[in-house]
Amino acid sequence: MRDAPELLERARELTGRSLRQARLVTDTTNFMNLELGDVLEVEGRRFVLKGTEYEGRFGLDEQPKYWVKRAVDWEDGSAKILKLEFFEEFDISRGGIKVRCYRSPAKEARILAMVKGNPNFMQGVTLRDEAGNLVRVLERIHGGPLDQHLQKLECDHLEYFQRHMRGVLTKLSVALEAIGWLHNQGAHHGDIRRDHLFVDETSGAWPWIDFDYKFEFKQNPYGLDLFGLGNVLTYAVARRDITHHLVRQEYPQAVETLSNEDFSPVIKNRLMNLKKIYPYLPESLNNVLLHFSNGAAVFYERVEELMAELTPAIAELPQEEG
Amino acid sequence: MPIWNRILATVDEHDISLEAVRYLAGVLGGSDACRVRIMSVYQAPEADAHPKQEERAAAAAQRKEVLLDRLEEARQILVGARIAAYNVSTRLEEAGGRTIAETIMAAQLQGGFGTIVVGRRGVSKAEEFLFGSVSSSIVHQATDCAVWVIN
């Protein structure tokens, strides 16, 4: 890093802050040391840092992601997200099973190039800094994650079913098929969650974000993605996670009808057989959800298998009101 | 056309796969009527998960060593059961972009094996959902050969 006082004025202008200094940074290896107002210069482009991104997960405290920075493009002042090179490996738990996970900048960079121009995925380019680190420059999406979007619909579940579900699942289908397309390119998303599916309020698209998780699977390479899709789909049908505890509280009459087969094999207390509490759901849609339950004889291994049953099931839902 | 007494036995890093070979030895012991190919599927460490070349090479060497040891162990089990050594062969097959089951089925087709022998670990429903099951996939994919699944 080297001091570059001549940068200060532009950095102040772009951040709207009264900065004391603006350093020119060409090597992002030590990203923990980067500060507000620093100017990153990579492959001839400049970005002024505005802060660190945080990630909250379903109501838990937000955690700083020091390798992900909010930034402003030096040239046009547009908002960007910069993901700096940070490789790590760690274990995550899925259904009590430990899975080795790798955070791979190279994987995300490759997928970014693959999905260029595809509105179903976040957009951006990858640049290399002076030290060869991969810097992913991402376009900021104007909108929020799917769960926030669905919560804005002020209605009870029956009304949601009658007025909105068909439209929501039709939009979701496009996102699900996009993951199928990704799989057919030999890639996988790696971290499919409802807060990794955004609703772009400008374009109306529902792009997936964050593709840097990598797993080494031996048999079913897409199983974890399909597990994620099942969770997102179930959430979109219920508009919330239905747990055993919630059924006891809000649908006590249904408790006696529940069996182990109605729940997720991975998230043990999550109800997948939603017809038990929403009896108006069509069998065809519920049968799709049951493929993600303990009672399933066969699990979906490909998105195409899921879509072959989900598409006609959506067609049976009540027509959306204009 | 697969030949029923041409047998493809698969082993991996799990102990149950050797149990399947012991079962096979118990059934075929002393026989000169079968040819057995013992096969292991090697999946190379991926660059995304092991970005440093030297670490990737070390992980690859370790994986191969484990599987080669298993193949030799399995060969000794069969030969020890008085199956003629010239009727037992071993092969380490690289998966490439294929799943383990796809690699096994390709070998079955190519070698004309009439019988596949595979161990089953008894994975939980969650594991099968997330990671799949080699034995279940083989049972689903096999159309022109017998499959022995050893629990």
Image: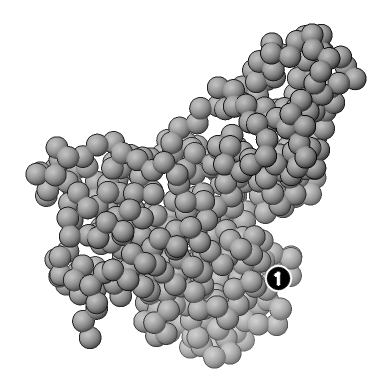
- A14 over A300 or under it: above or below: below
Q: Is residue A37 above or below residue B14?
A: below
Residue with the most extreme right position: B86
Q: Is residue B104 left or right of residue A266?
A: right
Q: Considering only vertical position in the picture, is A17 above or below A51? A: below
Q: What chain does badge 1 belong to?
A: A
Query: Is A247 on the left-hand or right-hand side of A69?
Result: left
| Quarter of the N terminus of chain A within the rendering | bottom right
Q: Is residue A322 or residue A2 the one in the foreground?
A: A322
Quarter in which the C terminus of chain A is drawn: bottom left
The total number of labels drawn is: 1
Residue at mark 1: A128
Q: Position of residue A154 (x, y in %)?
A: 16, 72
Residue at the far left in the pictured view? A253
Residue A63 place in picture, x, y as percent: 41, 55
Please state the horizontal and vertical placement of residue A261, each as a whole percent of the image.
31, 39
Local SS, label 1: strand
Identify which residue is drawn at 26% across, 69% down: A317
- Inspect the image, locate mark 1, and give the three-letter code of the amino acid beneath it: Arg
Which quadrant of the structure image shows residue A25? bottom right
Asked where in the image residue B66 lies, by quadrant, the reply is top right
Left or right of A275 on screen, residue A110: right
Q: Residue furthest front?
A: B1
Which quadrant holds residue B30? top right
Which residue is more in the foreground, B104 or A53?
B104
- Horizontal and vertical percent for residue A252? 10, 44
One can see residue A84 in this view: no
Q: Residue furthest bottom?
A: A76
